[in-house]
Structure formats: C-alpha cells, structure tokens
Image (spheres, grey):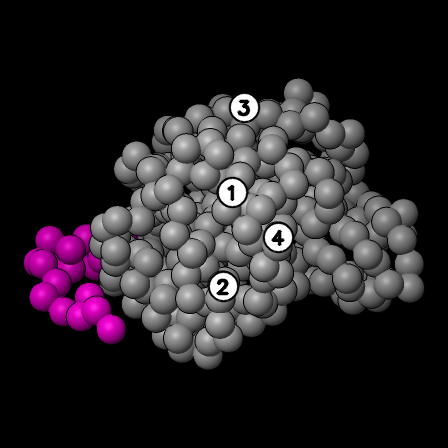
Amino acid sequence: MANYSRHIKLEDFMRRVWLTIMVCTGILLTSPVLISREIKTIFVTAPASFPERAKLESGVNALRSVGYRVVVGRSCQVSLSSREKANELNEAFANPEYDAIITARGGYGSYNLLDWLDWGLIASNPKPLVGYSDITALLLSIYFKTGLTTFHGPMVAVELGSDTQSVQNIAAIFNGERTIRFNYQSIPVIEGKMAGRLIPANLSLFQTLQGTEYLGSLKDAILVLEDVSETKESLERMIWNIAHLDDFSSLRGVVFAGFTEIKNGDLDDIKRVIHDYFLDKEIPVWIGLPSYHGDFPKVVLPVGQWVEIDMEKGTIEILPVPEARIK
C-alpha cells in the first residue's frame, strides 16, 4: 500500500489545523472551494453495498461518453472489508491522477469506513466526492472533519447509466456551474426563499451521525432530507427529531426532498406529519426537491456551500461568501 500518510509538509499541517479550528467553531469566512481542479479522470468506488455489474458498466460508459477517463476501484469488483474500502478511498484522494471520485451506489455500511479514513490526507488533497443515500455518512463527515465540499448527487451504478440528464448535471458542477436549476412541484409548509449553508442528507444516516464527531454545528444550515424503504412510524419519529433539534432555531430552512417505498403508509401520511410538526416554525419549510431515491434526473447539491434557494423559481444559486441576500 502506498506510503501516502508520511512526509507531511508544514503548510499542509497548518492548513489542517486552521480547517479544524474553523469547522469546530462553526466559523467559515468564505464558502469552501467548489471545484479546485479541472476534472479529467474519475475514480469509481463502492464504499457501501456491492454494485450490479451491468449497471456499473452502463454508468462508466456514460461518463466516458462525455469525455471523462474512468478508473474503477477494486471495491466495485471484489468484496472488501470496511478497512480495505477505507484504504481505497484514502488512496483515491491521495492519487494525483484522479480528479474526482463518484460512488457506485449506496445501500449499507459506509459509516463503517469513518474510523479508518485519513482526514489530514483528505484535507490536503481536495477533490469532489459524489453520492447520496448511505454515502451521506462520507459526505457529511468529510465536510465537517476537513471543510471540503462534497456532493450529494447521482451515482454510477444507479442513475448515470440510464439518465443522461443526471450525467449532464454532474458535468455542469464539475465545470464550475454555480446555478442549479430544477423543475419540480414543491409544496410550501412555510413559504419563503432560503439563504444559508447547504446540508443535504439521507435522514436516517443524518440521525446516525448525530452526537458523534462526524456531524458538526448546524448553525445557518439549510437541511435537505430524504429517505427510502422506511416505515411510516420510523419516518414520523425521525421527522419529529428534526423539529426538536437543539439548534433548530439557528437553521435557515428545511426541505424534505422526498420519501419513497414507504412501508405501512404513503407520502400523504408523511406530508401530514411534516405539516403538523413544522407549521409553527419561523423558517421556510418545503416538501419536494429532485434529490431523493427514484427514477428521475437528480440535481447535484454541494455540501457545505452557501446557497440561495428559490423553490418557486426552481433555482439554487451557489454564493461566493456566506451571506443572506434575503432581508
């Protein structure tokens, strides 16, 4: 295995110390860098469940068809332990040949990698990491531990082989596009635009990380939450938890993107729950954003970036500095 964690330069060490101070105190003077390099080569890894070969190949071919060189990791080809998957991810960040990392699929188990990740190495080698669902554990922990932007978006063996718009959405973000557009019939619980720090997540993984070192301050956050294959009762309990967060009053907004394959209930049940728990809140709360499980083009959401969201117009504008344009 590559000896990537030794010989750390002093400036890299100081950068990590400063990032740690900023993240732990919640002080971010500017938004994290969106994309720090030209994206030519993409590394594909499977930190959660094992991908289907045919879907993986279709997704890889879709990325190649728009001009990317793609390298597929061992985790997509053979069964690896959590520690081996973590080592593969560490090495993907360290390898200068790889400009971005996209996960193959979600499923189960990515939180098991967290104890083996080299946070200093990752902070010193910034590059985009894309995924959603179970990958939330990696997206949020990397952002909160290093200050780097990660991306809640479509995955190689899920959407990319069958949905050209999702491929184009990733390419647009990789090219530095700062306005994300979507066409969706969103439902207001409490109307209003939102400006704040974007924190998209799978709801159950978000709650798995609560109270751990891997989830930091939510001050000024806009939460975008989704989930799949949960019971009505489980979703109700988790949504109640969001409404009663200790730092809820410091949030800038909440978007419940979508919930699919609900057991013992349906989406109308969940909509009623959200209205009951959030109607008296003092921040914008919305239902519906194309960033959840389902067969449709998915937007790519930059974790930790300061954004302005206009749900009525269907725009998410990435802001250059932490500021609220809405007075």
Say which mark, if any, is on residue 327.
3
Q: Residues within 10 Å of mark 1 (few under 14, many from 20)?
A: some
- Residue 18 location in percent, x, y? 22, 54
Q: Residue furthest top?
A: 313
SS state under label 3: loop
Give the image quarter of residue 164.
Answer: top right
Which residue is under mark 2? 76
Q: Amino acid at mark 4?
A: Lys
Q: Nearer the viewer, residue 115 or 53?
A: 53
- Residue 233 location in percent, x, y? 84, 66
| Residue in the image at 39% along x and 29% along y | 175
Give the total number of marks visible in the rendering: 4
Which residue is under mark 4? 55
SS state under label 2: helix
> Is disc 1 in contact with disc 3, using a CB cutoff of under 8 Å?
no
**Magenta segment:** 1-21
Give the CA distance from mark 4 to mark 1: 10 Å
Give the CA distance from mark 2 to mark 3: 48 Å
Asked if one can make out residue 199 in the rendered structure from this viewpoint, the answer is: no
Q: Earlier in the sequence, mark 2 or mark 3?
A: 2
Give the CA distance from mark 2 to mark 1: 15 Å
Which residue is under mark 1? 61
- Residue 293 location in percent, x, y? 70, 49
| Left or right of residue 112, residue 161 in this image | right
Q: Amino acid at mark 3?
A: Lys
Q: Earlier in the sequence, mark 1 or mark 3?
A: 1
